[in-house]
Amino acid sequence: MRAAWYESNGEANDVMHVGERPTPQAGAGEVRVKLHTSGVNPSDVKSRRARPLGSPYIIPHSDGAGVIDQVGAGVPASRMGERVWTWNAQWQRPDGTAAEYVVLPSAMAAHLPDNTSFEAGACMGIPGLTALQAVRLAGDVKGKQVLVTGASSAVGHYITQMLVQAGAEVLGTVGSEAKAAHARAAGASHTLRYKNGHTVDEVKTLTHGKGVDVVIDMDFSTTAAWLAQGVLKHHGQLVCYGSNPPPDISIAFRAMLFGSFNLKFFLVYDLLPADREVCVQTLNTMLSEGRLQHTLLPSFTLDQVVQAHELVEAGQSIGNVVLSMAH
């Protein structure tokens, strides 16, 4: 099969290879997916640059979508020909979705509703599941004000839609007018330009000095300082799924304590099985009902994997980056 892979950490143009690799075969409890698409996420870029490989090579990308074309022992034959999307394909294992085929445990190939494209399916594993779990952890948000950091990002765009559908008023941080328009199209009531340094003051104005009920956060390195400045109301909660460097972040304990804040952190790769099951089922229901907007950039080919990684790395694009496999 054709695939992309790297054998050492580094810049995409220096370490990425595209060529032939052995076609995998499904073992017991596994399915083989003939991939139509492969999602490229910031975590894939960070892994290529710095995460120790743990094996002689890495075929990158955890997310993808395609059709099951082979089942192993113990897997119902009825899964043959099923449209599916994948999660965690390259988490703690070398073989991801930047290839014509991927073999996975059967549960890691989730049913893809007929009304959902393979391109959109390749956005569910990390962006979709992260967004849904963040909103689930936020609890009942009906009538509440929620600050979404990075509201125009791949994850933030889904978070904004889900919150609005749950009855929340969304305040979203963005980096440009184009990104502000993107967040508003997803339902954000207010967009705040975080680069101007006035986000906390703007939040206080919009919340009459009380702060928001909930913060759903992609960058705790920035937001940790905001918590001590009144961005979150008394007994409010923060749900965090990521951060930019530095990895060790100071927090103002007294502000946390006297604010009675509730801080929740989660890693989408490491959801508890019960949470994962609920998220997959709920996400598929939302897809089946057509309740999610997908913003997809023009697809890259497998041979353009370097350019796809570089686009994600630049962080300026609006929408999800997807590879399309030619069959």
Image (tube, helix red, strand yellow):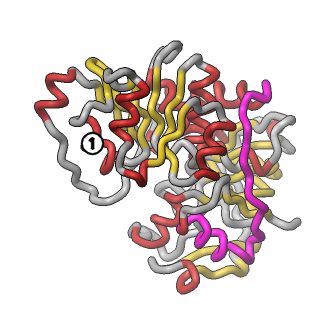
Asked where in the image residue 117 lies, by quadrant, the reply is top right
At 27% across and 42% down in the image, what residue appears? Answer: 224
Is 312 in front, or is 277?
Answer: 312
Which contiguous range is marked in magenta?
289-313
Q: In this view, does 178 lie above or below 287?
A: below
- The image position of residue 317, as x and y in percent, is 63, 60
Q: On the rendered image, what quadrant is the C terminus found in?
A: bottom right
Q: In this view, does 179 lie above or below 235?
A: below
At 46% across and 56% down in the image, what residue appears? Answer: 92
Is 104 in front, or is 207?
Answer: 207
At 61% across and 24% down in the image, what residue appears? Answer: 164
Q: How crowded is mark 1: few (under 14 residues within 10 Å), some or many (20 or more)?
A: some
Residue with the mark numbered 1: 224
- The image position of residue 292, as x and y in percent, is 72, 33
At 57% across and 57% down in the image, what residue appears? Answer: 41
308 in magenta: yes
The residue most toward the left is: 254
Amino acid residing under circle 1: Ala
Q: Is residue 29 visible?
A: no
- The image position of residue 207, as x and y in percent, is 40, 23
